[in-house]
Image (tube, coloured by chain):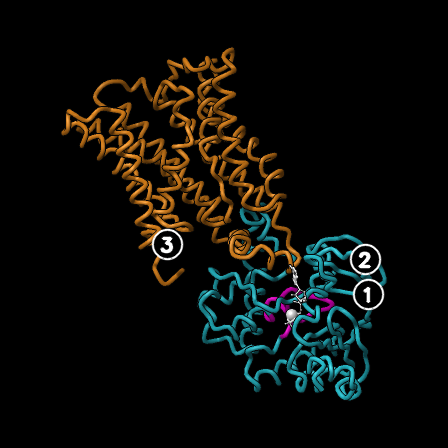
Chain colours: A orange, B cyan
C-alpha cells in the first residue's frame, strides 16, 4: 500500500510541475501553449541520455532544463511575432515534431524501442521502499522549488507585467513596454520547469518510449490547470491532484470490471476527463481555486 | 516636443478613413480635435501612435520623422495615447494598473525580479506613492484595490487616464477623456491637464463634450469624413457653418 501511495505521489508531483509551468505560460502570461509535452519529452530524453552515458545526475537535470528552454527560445521568437492564436498551432506542431524526431533518430534515441535501463537516483537505498521514498522527497523538493520560483516571479514587478500582458497586450505596448521579449523569457522558464519534470519522469520510469509523449499529455495538463484555475498556483496542485485521482480511479474501476478491456478503459477515461472539462467550463470556468467573483 | 502630421492617408476596408490629414501640436501645446462620429479621429490616433501604419504622408515628433516605427518605440519617445474604449488590465487591481505603467522599472526585468531586492522595493514604494497620488486625484480611492475589470465604465476611463499619467509622457493623445466621467470631475481633470500642460506636456484631445473642450484648449481642429475641415480658436471653429453642417449631417 505504501509503495502504491508513493508511486501515485511521485506521478502527482510530476504532473504538478507540468501544470505549474503551463500555468506560468497560460494562466499568468496568456501564452497558449498546446505543446507542453514537447518540453517534457526533451527533458526526459536529455536526462536519460546523459545518465546512460555515465554522466552525473546533476548534468542530466541541467541539460534537461537547458535544452527545453533552448527549444522554447526560437519557438517563442517565431510564434510571438505572429498573431497570438498561432502560438497554439506552432507549439502543438512543435511537440509532434519532437516526438517524430525522437522516433526517427534511432542512433540516438533507439527509436520506438525506447531507452531502457535509465538509472534512478537513490536506487541504492534498495529494499523496504526507502529508495522510492527518497525519490519522492526529491520530486517534492522540485515541486516546492517550482512553487517558490513561480510565486516569487508573479509577485514581482516582472510578474505584474506578465499579467498585464495577459490582460491587454495592446495597452502594454501603448505604455512603451515591449511584450515580446518578456513573453520569450516566460516561455523559456516554463519550458525549463517542464524539462525538469521530464527528467524526473525518465529517472522514475527507468524506461522511456516516444509514445509516452503524445499530445494527450498536454491535454491532461491543460485539464488539470483549468480544473484548478488558470492563474492560481494552489489551483495547479489541486488540478493535478484531481487529474491523478481520475487517472488512478479509472484504473481501480477497471480492476473491478474485469470485462472492460484496457483500450476501452482508456477511451472511457478520456471521455470522463472530457466530460469533466465541459462541466467545468460551463459551471466553474475559473477553476476550483479561483473565487467566482474574480472573473 | 512638437507633433507634426503631414498629408496622412489611411485606407480601411476599401474606405479612405483618413484623407490627406495635416495638423500640428506645437511644443507644449494644448490642442483639441473634434468631428462627428466616424470622422476618423480615433483612426488618426492609431496612425500617430504607431498602432496602424499610414498609407501615405508623414508623422514627425520632436522634429524627427517617426517613419514606420511601432507603438512601443513611439511611446518610449514620450508620445503616448489613451484609448476611447478603455483597455484596463482587468485582473490586476486599479493600483496595480497604474503601477504597471511606470516606466523603466528595474523589477520588471528578470534580473531585477531576483536580485537587488532592496533597491527594487524602494523603487516600488516610490511608484506606489505616485500611483496613490493619482488615484487620489482621480477619485478612485474607493476602488483602489478592486480588480480593474470590475469597476464602472467611467472609472475605467479614469484608469486609462491615470495609467498614461504614470507613464511620464511628453505628449499625450487623449481619446474622449470625459466620456462617462461626471461633470465635476471633468472640471478637475481639465484643471489637472492645464497644470501638466504648464509643466511642458503637450496634449491633443479628442472630445465630444464641445463645451468642456472649448474651455480647456486654446486651439481646435475639426475634421469630418477623414478630412480636416479647419482649425482656429474654439469660438471660430464652433461657429463655422461648414463645421456645424458636418455635425448636423448636412440637414442645416
Ligand atoms: N477596421 C476597419 N475597417 C473598416 N472601416 C473602419 C475600420 N475601423 C474604422 N473604420 C471606419 O473608419 C471611420 C473612422 O472611424 P474612427 O473610429 O476613426 O472615427 P471617430 O472619429 O473616432 O468616431 P467616434 O467619434 O465615433 O469615436 C468610420 O467610418 C469607421 O467605420
Ligand atoms: Mg473615436
Residue sitting at 73 percent across and 68 percent down? Answer: B171
Q: Is residue A291 visible?
A: yes
Asked if disc 1 is less than 8 Å from ligand 1, the answer is no
Q: Please tell me which residue is depicted at 36% across the width and 37% down the height of the picture.
A: A220
**Which range of residues does the magenta coloring cover?**
B161-176
From the viewer's perspective, is A258 left or right of B73? left
Residue with the mark numbered 1: B20
The chain containing the residue under callout 3 comes to A
At numbered mark 2, what does the secondary structure look like: helix, strand or loop?
Answer: strand
Same-chain status of marks 1 and 3: no
Q: Quadrant of the C terminus of chain B?
A: bottom right
Residue A278's place in the image compared with B44, above or below, is: above
What chain is tagged by disc 2? B
Taking B69 as reference, is A127 above or below it? above
Please tell me whether mark 1 sits on a helix, a strand or a loop: strand
Say whether marks 2 and 3 touch (CB < 8 Å).
Answer: no
Which label belongs to residue B56?
2
Q: Residue at x 42, y 51 (%)?
A: A231
Q: Quadrant of residue B101?
A: bottom right
- Image location (x, y in percent) of residue A43: 47, 27
> Is A59 drawn above or below residue A92 in the view shown?
above
Using the rendered image, report if marks 2 and 3 lie on a common chain: no
Query: Would you say A79 lies left or right of B90 here?
Result: right
Which residue appears farthest toward the top when viewing the image? Answer: A107
Residue B62 found in image quarter? bottom right
Name the residue tied to disc 3.
Answer: A286
Q: Quadrant of ligand 1?
A: bottom right
Label 1: few (<14), some (14–19) or many (≥20) C-alpha neighbours in 10 Å: some
* Residue A45 coordinates in the image, percent (x, y): 46, 22
Looking at the rendered structure, whether the residues under marks 2 and 1 are on a common chain is answered as: yes
Amino acid at each position: 500500500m505504501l509503495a502504491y501511495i508513493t508511486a501515485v505521489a511521485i506521478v502527482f508531483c510530476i504532473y504538478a510541475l507540468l501544470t505549474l509551468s503551463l500555468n506560468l505560460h497560460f494562466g499568468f502570461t496568456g501564452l497558449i501553449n498546446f505543446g507542453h509535452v514537447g518540453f517534457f519529452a526533451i527533458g526526459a530524453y536529455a536526462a536519460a541520455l546523459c545518465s546512460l552515458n555515465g554522466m552525473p545526475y546533476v548534468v542530466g537535470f541541467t541539460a534537461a532544463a537547458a535544452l527545453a528552454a533552448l527549444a522554447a527560445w526560437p519557438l517563442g521568437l517565431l510564434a510571438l511575432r505572429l498573431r497570438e492564436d498561432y502560438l497554439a498551432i506552432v507549439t502543438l506542431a512543435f511537440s509532434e515534431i519532437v516526438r517524430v524526431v525522437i522516433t526517427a533518430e534511432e542512433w540516438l534515441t533507439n527509436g520506438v524501442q525506447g531507452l531502457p535501463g535509465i538509472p534512478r537516483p537513490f536506487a541504492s537505498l534498495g529494499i523496504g521502499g526507502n529508495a522510492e521514498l527518497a525519490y519522492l522527497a526529491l520530486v517534492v523538493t522540485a515541486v516546492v522549488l517550482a512553487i517558490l520560483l513561480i510565486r516569487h516571479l508573479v509577485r514581482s514587478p516582472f510578474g505584474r507585467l506578465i499579467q498585464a500582458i495577459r490582460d491587454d497586450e495592446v495597452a502594454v505596448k501603448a505604455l512603451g513596454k515591449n511584450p515580446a521579449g518578456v513573453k520569450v523569457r516566460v516561455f523559456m522558464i516554463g519550458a525549463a520547469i517542464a524539462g525538469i519534470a521530464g527528467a524526473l519522469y525518465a529517472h522514475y520510469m527507468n524506461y522511456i518510449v516516444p509514445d509516452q509523449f503524445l499530445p494527450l499529455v498536454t491535454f491532461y495538463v491543460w485539464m488539470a490547470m483549468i480544473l484548478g484555475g488558470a492563474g492560481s498556483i494552489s489551483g495547479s496542485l489541486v488540478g493535478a491532484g484531481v487529474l491523478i485521482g481520475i487517472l488512478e480511479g479509472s484504473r481501480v474501476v477497471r480492476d473491478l470490471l474485469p470485462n472492460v478491456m484496457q483500450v476501452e478503459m482508456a477511451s472511457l477515461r478520456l471521455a470522463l476527463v472530457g466530460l469533466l472539462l465541459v462541466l467545468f467550463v460551463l459551471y466553474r470556468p475559473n477553476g476550483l481555486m479561483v473565487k467566482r467573483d474574480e472573473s | 516636443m512638437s507633433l507634426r502630421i503631414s498629408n496622412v492617408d489611411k485606407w480601411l476596408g476599401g474606405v479612405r478613413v483618413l484623407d490627406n490629414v495635416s495638423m500640428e501640436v506645437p511644443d507644449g501645446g494644448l490642442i483639441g480635435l473634434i468631428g462627428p462620429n466616424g470622422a476618423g479621429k480615433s483612426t488618426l490616433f492609431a496612425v500617430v501612435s504607431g498602432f496602424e501604419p499610414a498609407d501615405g504622408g508623414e508623422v514627425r515628433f520632436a522634429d524627427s520623422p517617426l517613419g514606420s516605427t511601432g507603438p512601443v518605440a513611439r511611446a518610449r519617445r514620450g508620445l503616448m495615447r489613451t484609448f476611447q474604449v478603455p483597455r484596463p488590465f482587468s485582473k490586476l487591481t486599479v493600483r496595480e494598473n497604474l503601477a504597471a505603467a511606470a516606466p523603466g522599472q528595474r523589477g520588471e526585468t528578470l534580473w531585477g525580479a531576483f536580485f537587488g531586492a532592496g533597491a527594487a522595493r524602494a523603487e516600488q514604494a516610490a511608484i506606489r506613492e505616485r500611483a496613490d497620488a493619482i488615484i487620489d486625484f482621480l477619485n478612485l480611492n474607493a476602488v483602489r484595490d478592486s480588480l480593474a475589470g470590475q469597476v464602472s465604465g467611467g472609472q475605467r476611463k479614469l484608469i486609462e487616464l491615470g495609467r498614461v499619467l504614470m507613464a511620464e509622457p511628453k505628449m499625450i493623445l487623449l481619446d474622449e477623456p470625459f466620456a462617462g466621467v461626471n461633470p465635476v470631475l471633468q472640471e478637475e481633470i481639465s484643471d489637472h491637464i492645464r497644470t501638466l500642460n504648464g509643466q511642458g506636456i503637450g496634449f491633443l484631445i479628442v472630445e465630444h463634450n464641445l463645451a468642456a473642450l472649448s474651455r480647456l484648449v486654446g486651439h481646435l481642429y475639426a475634421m469630418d469624413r477623414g478630412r480636416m475641415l479647419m482649425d482656429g480658436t474654439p469660438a471660430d471653429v464652433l461657429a463655422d457653418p461648414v463645421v456645424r453642417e458636418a455635425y448636423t449631417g448636412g440637414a442645416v
